Amino acid sequence: MSELCPPWAPFFGFAGVTSAMVLSTIGAAYGTSKAGIGLAGLGQFRPELIMKSLIPVVMSGIIAVYGLVVSVLISGGITPSEPYSLFAGFVHLAAGLACGMTGLAAGYAIGIVGDACVRAYLNESRVFVVMVLILIFAEVLGLYGLIVALILNTSVGDVVCGA
């Protein structure tokens, strides 16, 4: 086996798969729960506003989808029948961490903003537009991580492993 393609190199690729999926899902779960708490508080006083205030919960779920997309793309690049380079493993780890960490940060931001703004929307309807804008900015954090992960994943290319 070559120095470029050690048998333990796929460990780093699968660590990237795991970090993308787990970290982005934790962020999405936190965002959903935190925004859901605010939504439950709103529903006690103004139940007619519940459907309009579901935006933070839906946006949190999208963060988990980013992690799923990156995980599927990375795991598709790891096949047992073909040699897998250490370079590819580290690039896949970096892609997974980029998507996972930004998903975690975006989920936290969406949860905190969603909770506060949904509660404020109870008293002032003009807060809704501001809430949507801030949530878009928080969601973009996760989107940036997805884009970086996609760019990294395409940079792996074909590293030839010597005999």
Image (cartoon, rainbow, N blue to C red):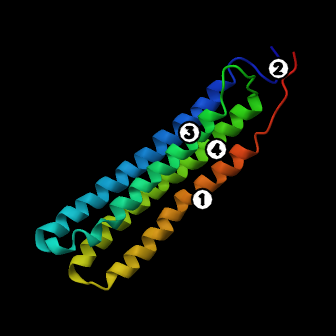
- Which disc, if any, is residue 72? 3
Q: Which amino acid does label 1 sit on?
A: Tyr
The 10 Å Cα crowd at callout 2, few under 14, some 14 to 19, many 20 or more, is few
Specify whether 156 is left or right of 57: right
Disc 4 marks which residue? Answer: 95
Mark 2 vs mark 3: in front: 3
Disc 2 marks which residue? Answer: 3
| Whole-number angstrom distance, CA of label 2 to CA of label 3 | 27 Å
Residue at image x 54%, y 53%? 102
Q: Residue furthest left?
A: 44
Quarter of the picture holding the C terminus:
top right
Q: Looking at the picture, does residue 60 appear above or below residue 20? A: below
Q: Of helix, strand and loop, which one carries label 1?
A: helix
- Which disc, if any, is residue 144? 1
Quarter of the picture holding the N terminus:
top right
Which comes sooner in the sequence, label 3 or label 4? 3
The 10 Å Cα crowd at callout 4, few under 14, some 14 to 19, many 20 or more, is many
Residue 114 coordinates in the image, percent (x, y):
34, 66
Q: What residue type is labelled 4?
A: Ala
Residue at image x 53%, y 64%? 140
Q: Of helix, strand and loop, which one carries label 2?
A: loop
In-front residue for pair 43/65: 65
Q: Of helix, strand and loop, which one carries label 3?
A: helix
Residue at image x 65%, y 29%? 78
Label 2 near label 1: C-beta < 8 Å? Answer: no
Label 1 near label 4: C-beta < 8 Å? Answer: no
| Whole-number angstrom distance, CA of label 4 to CA of label 1 | 12 Å
Mark 3 vs mark 4: in front: 3
Q: What residue type is labelled 2?
A: Glu
